[in-house]
Amino acid sequence: MNLQKLLKEAQKAQKKAAEVQERLEAMTVVGSAQGLVEVEANGHGRILALRLKPEALKAFQDDPEGLEDLLLVAIQDAQRKARELSEKEMARELGGVGDMLGKLF
């Protein structure tokens, strides 16, 4: 493969990666902890919403540290799901190149 063709392919891959990044901004995932806390994040892992079920407040009214732990678990779950979504979308669009480019963005 000549250098010019390689550069053209790299530009195509970069454009596809940018398109995936744009789509990920609009995609959402939901992380949860024990069904009591839900955290919504976009495909980049940015937190968009946090929902506490009334039962969570009752169950942890005397244990704020326990509620904080649930919040952390739900946030980490949402961020893990966002990372998996991002990797899947990059791989779908770019194949093996997606893994490499996904780490650059």
Image (cartoon, rainbow, N blue to C red):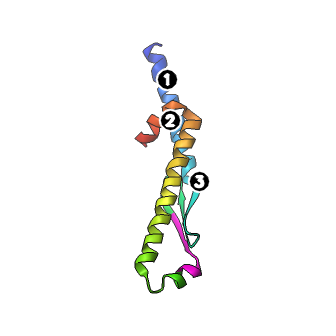
Mark 2 is surrounded, within 10 Å at the Cα level, by few (under 14), some (14 to 19) or many (20 or more) other residues, namely many
Distance in Å between CA atoms under marks 1 and 2: 16 Å
Residue 43 sits above or below residue 48 on the image: above
Foreground label between 1 and 2: 2
- Of the 4 image quadrants, the one containing the C terminus is top left
The amino acid pointed to by label 2 is: Gly
Mark 3 is surrounded, within 10 Å at the Cα level, by few (under 14), some (14 to 19) or many (20 or more) other residues, namely some
The amino acid pointed to by label 3 is: Met
Q: Return the x and y of residue 25 as percentages of the image width and height.
A: 54, 52
From the image, tell me which residue sits under label 3. 27
> Element type at marker 1?
helix
> Element type at marker 3?
loop
| Sequence-wise first label, 1 or 2 | 1
Which residue is painted at 46% across and 60% down in the image?
76
**Badge 1 vs badge 3, beta-carbon distance below 8 Å:** no
* Residue 98 badge: 2
